[in-house]
Image: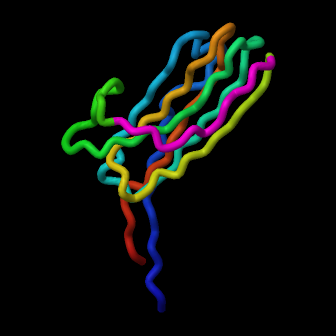
Amino acid sequence: MPTIAKPTKASGVLLALAAGNIPGGTTQRYALDVSTSPGGVISVNTSNDAALTAQAEARVYVSHKDGALPGINDASWRKVATLFGTGTNNGQKADGLFYIPFAARFVMVEVGGHTGGSLSASIESTVVTDITST
């Protein structure tokens, strides 16, 4: 009988969906310690609450720093992906997905850069916490 790998996963909400939870002209950042995880996924969903004069972007950063989770303004963060731009139309929606690689230590997601209105956004994660054989 073949051995089957069974992953154990943990999900979390980094930013709960709420109307206008990212005001225009601001940036929200959320970081995860994935140093003991063999991978996972992060999803980002946004909706423009009004017409924007400049679109928001969702970006993903990694840090290779040893030790504890770096602060959100730490110089060790490196941008690895821009998931999407939100566009500028009122009510326009955007969704993005980022797969956390096995080698990542720390991952940070940021949404912002928009002006002229607010966004409603959510950021969620699921990481593998263990793999067992059956």
Asked if 73 appears above or below 97 in the picture, the reply is above
Please provide the residue range marked out in magenta.
Answer: 77-89
Residue 27 appears at what percent x and percent y?
51, 18
Residue 85 on the magenta segment: yes
The image quadrant of residue 91 is top right
Residue under the image location 39 percent in, 33 percent down: 31
Q: Is residue 56 left or right of residue 6?
A: right
Residue under the image location 71 percent in, 12 percent down: 53
Residue 59 appears at what percent x and percent y?
53, 34
- The quarter of the rendered structure image containing the C terminus is bottom left
Residue nearer the viewer, 130 or 38: 38
Q: Which residue is most to the top?
A: 116
Residue 110 appears at what percent x and percent y?
50, 29
Residue nearer the viewer, 61 or 11: 61
| Color encoding of the figure | rainbow
Residue 18 on the magenta segment: no
Residue under the image location 70 percent in, 27 percent down: 86
Magenta-colored segment: predominant secondary structure? strand
The image quadrant of residue 47 is top right
Residue under the image location 19 percent in, 42 percent down: 67
The image quadrant of residue 76 is top left
Asked if 72 appears above or below 119 in the picture, the reply is below
Q: Is residue 89 left or right of residue 97?
A: right
Q: Which residue is most to the bottom?
A: 1
